[in-house]
């Protein structure tokens, strides 16, 4: 299937966004206290589709809520009554506007764990019903390293509609999937010009090359994968994790971290079961009743975090569990960088050989 | 995912106080007909909810060859299990999800000598397989059960062990850690009794072991010393779990999901895992 590319200007793009918002439930970055989170919006003026990446939370909560009700129940001596919660508000047909490329990619990574063996049908429904419009960044942020990882940022097909602000001042819109094609077909009614891929390619390439040249961070992920896989026992993990305060923020803001906990909250006879974010950095994460804990110390938990992202998930599902967005590093209260952690440990592994 | 986390309601049919800190809960599904549909194999586990207190992972300690119920044997060890011991009685209701996980390699052990080595509450998962094998006794050759506990009072399934002892086709060896006045048989830790009393035949024998982590470690060392191949030593791992569905990430050891790829592993498989369990 070949997909359409349009050329328009800033006003044409705005018209497109407004048409989208008028026809579908739309989520977009909304500013609050200087930070952007994806919220339901009705008008373009409420949001910023090109919010700065360093200040924008990921789209993960729209697919994997921070806290979700699993069920409600009444448990008394007379018996137990379990009722399912109300309809899933995230499963409706919707558009996400202003997702970053790394956000879009994170869904491809998460698809693997949610779709093996037991299928997470809630996640799947949310995924199927969502169209993602993503503007390609113009410049990498300090902690970005998406172009160093195992996905093709330029030709990403995890997003449905690509928006590129060309160096020529024009705006390019490209459908990348059938869902994106359908959305463009239904809502793009401005005076934009339909162009061929070849006509759009030079400007889009120019924009990508300038973006790709702006990265401070570069890594050879294959080397990191290979070296980490060989170095389970190394004091280097203690060195890199020493400052960690086990606050778990890195996992909570990470677009690919997916560990969760199940907890019950009961007042008198009525209770709610929740599923909410958890993190392997928690000391109690693997603590068993009776006291046995396979990861009782911090460096082991950091080793798990680094290895899960760059070795174990890759072994199991074929992808790095990292999209190079830098959110964990930006949010870390003690300035630990996942990029530095895996770079330093794998460099140490290299030195030992 | 949220839907997969909603449990079915089960009724507690019977509570058996096995030891001062272990109780067996005999359960049936509240909804008619569900019990017959609940099929599981020895080694599998369930997620067991005391609603309001929390959800815990327990192996099923009975065999589906015994119809009409299933058992969970629960040792008082943490917050939820303490609540269970304090408040869960006959007629009460609990939430159950499952069965989850893999099971003992039933095809591999057919036609073999069986040696079960259990310690403490570790007999619970073995009991499921022991019952299954007793109910299919002609499929197996020699059948030995070595079971150890700290004291005679700490032995689980005392009545059932008597039945096993009375069964001429089973060889039952019991041991406790320290001598007691009324105890007339073996005294000593499980690996010692394994080497000095049981002296198992190596050839054509499958060993299935479970107990406290330290016991498993030394038992496996003894078995290897005795000459057992890693693939013939089978154990079931204790690991923190929550979802049971290969999603929540808690039971990961390396790229392995203990809740899906396990909890049953051969020693050969355990050796390929990072040393973190």
Image (cartoon, coloured by chain):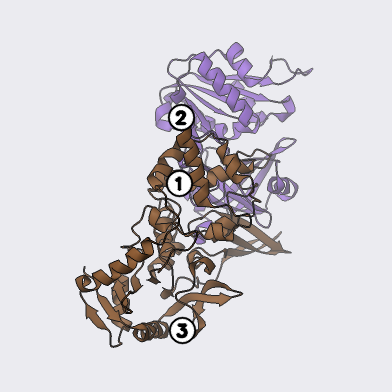
Q: Nearer the viewer, residue A266 or A343?
A: A343
Q: Is mark 3 on a helix, strand or loop?
A: helix
Q: Residue furthest right?
A: B181
The residue beneath circle 2 is B136
Tell me where residue B189 appears, x and y as whole percent: 66, 20
Tell me where residue B18 appears, x and y as whole percent: 69, 35
The numbered mark, 1 or 3, whose residue comes first in the sequence reads: 3
Badge 1 and badge 2 both on one subunit: no
**Residue at 24%, 73% in the rendered image:** A200
**Residue at 63%, 45% in the rendered image:** A242
Marker disc for residue A44: 3
User: Can residue B39 be seen in the rendering of this structure?
Assistant: yes
Q: Nearer the viewer, residue B209 or A26?
A: A26
Name the chain letter of the residue that bears numbered label 2: B
Q: Which of A233 and A349 is in front in this view?
A: A349
Q: Colour of chain B?
A: purple
Name the chain letter of the residue that bears numbered label 1: A
Distance in Å between CA atoms under marks 1 and 3: 38 Å
The residue beneath circle 1 is A310
Q: How crowded is mark 2: few (under 14 residues within 10 Å), some or many (20 or more)?
A: few
Residue A341 in the image: above or below residue A48:
above
Can you tell which of label 1 and label 2 is closer to the viewer? Answer: 1
Badge 2 and badge 3 both on one subunit: no
Q: Residues within 10 Å of mark 1 (few under 14, many from 20)?
A: many
Q: What element carries label 1?
A: helix
User: Can residue B89 be seen in the rendering of this structure?
Assistant: no
Tell me where residue A276 appears, x and y as whole percent: 58, 60
Residue A107 in the image: above or below residue B181:
below
Q: What element carries label 2?
A: loop
Distance in Å between CA atoms under marks 1 and 2: 46 Å
Indicate the chain coloured brown by its letter.
A
Quarter-of-image position of residue B232: top left
């Amino acid at each position: 299937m070949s997909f359409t590319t349009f050329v328009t200007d800033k006003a044409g793009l705005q018209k497109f966004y407004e048409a989208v918002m008028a026809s579908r439930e739309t989520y977009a970055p909304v500013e609050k206290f200087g930070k952007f989170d994806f919220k339901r919006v009705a008008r373009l003026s409420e949001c910023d589709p090109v919010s700065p990446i360093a200040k924008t939370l990921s789209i993960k909560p729209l697919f994997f809520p921070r806290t979700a009700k699993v069920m409600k129940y009444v448990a008394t001596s007379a018996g137990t009554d379990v009722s399912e919660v109300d309809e899933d508000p995230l499963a409706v047909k919707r558009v996400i506007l202003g997702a970053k490329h790394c956000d879009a990619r994170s869904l491809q990574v998460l698809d693997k764990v949610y779709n093996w063996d037991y299928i997470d049908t809630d996640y799947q429904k949310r995924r199927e019903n969502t169209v993602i419009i993503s503007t390609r960044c113009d410049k990498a942020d300090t902690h970005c390293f998406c172009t160093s990882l195992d996905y093709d940022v330029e030709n990403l097909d995890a997003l449905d509609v690509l928006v590129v602000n060309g160096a020529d001042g024009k705006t390019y819109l490209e459908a990348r999937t059938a869902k994106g094609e359908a959305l463009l077909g239904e809502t793009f009614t401005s005076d934009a010009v339909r162009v061929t891929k070849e006509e759009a390619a030079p400007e889009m390439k120019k924009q990508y090359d300038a973006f790709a040249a702006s990265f401070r961070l570069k890594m050879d992920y294959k080397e990191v994968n290979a070296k980490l896989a060989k170095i389970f026992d190394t004091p280097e993990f203690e060195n890199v994790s020493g400052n960690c305060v086990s606050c778990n923020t890195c996992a909570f803001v990470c677009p690919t971290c997916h560990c969760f906990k199940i907890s019950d909250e009961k007042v008198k006879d009525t209770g709610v079961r929740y599923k909410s974010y958890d993190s392997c950095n928690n000391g109690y994460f693997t603590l068993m009743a009776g006291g046995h804990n396979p990861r009782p110390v911090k460096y082991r938990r950091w080793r798990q975090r680094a290895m899960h992202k760059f070795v174990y998930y890759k072994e199991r599902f074929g992808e790095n569990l990292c999209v190079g967005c830098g959110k964990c590093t930006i949010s870390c209260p003690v300035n630990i960088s996942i990029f530095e952690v895996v770079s330093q440990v794998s460099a140490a592994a290299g030195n030992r050989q | 995912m949220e839907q997969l986390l909603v449990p079915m309601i089960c009724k507690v049919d019977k509570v058996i106080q096995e030891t001062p800190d272990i109780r067996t809960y005999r359960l049936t599904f509240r909804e008619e007909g569900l019990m017959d549909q609940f099929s599981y194999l020895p080694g599998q586990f369930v997620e067991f909810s005391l609603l309001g207190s929390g959800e815990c992972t327990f192996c099923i300690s009975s065999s589906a060859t015994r119809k009409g119920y299933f058992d969970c044997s629960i040792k008082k060890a943490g917050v939820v299990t303490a609540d269970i011991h304090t408040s869960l009685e006959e007629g009460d209701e609990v939430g159950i999800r499952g069965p989850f996980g893999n099971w003992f390699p039933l095809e591999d052990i057919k036609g073999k000598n069986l040696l079960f080595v259990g310690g403490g509450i570790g007999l619970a998962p073995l009991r499921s397989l022991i019952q299954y094998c007793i109910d299919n006794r002609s499929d197996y050759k020699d059948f030995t059960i070595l079971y150890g506990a700290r004291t005679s009072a700490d032995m689980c399934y005392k009545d059932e062990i008597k039945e096993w002892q009375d069964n001429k086709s089973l060889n039952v060896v019991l041991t406790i850690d320290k001598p007691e006045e009324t105890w007339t048989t073996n005294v000593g830790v499980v690996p010692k009794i394994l080497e000095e009393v049981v002296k198992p035949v190596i050839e054509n024998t499958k060993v299935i072991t479970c107990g406290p982590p330290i016991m498993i470690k030394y038992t496996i060392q003894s078995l290897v010393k005795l000459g057992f191949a890693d693939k013939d030593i089978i154990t079931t791992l204790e690991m923190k779990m929550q979802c049971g569905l290969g999603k929540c990430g808690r039971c990961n050891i390396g790229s392995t999901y203990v809740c899906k790829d396990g909890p049953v592993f051969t020693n050969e498989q355990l050796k390929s895992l990072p040393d973190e369990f």
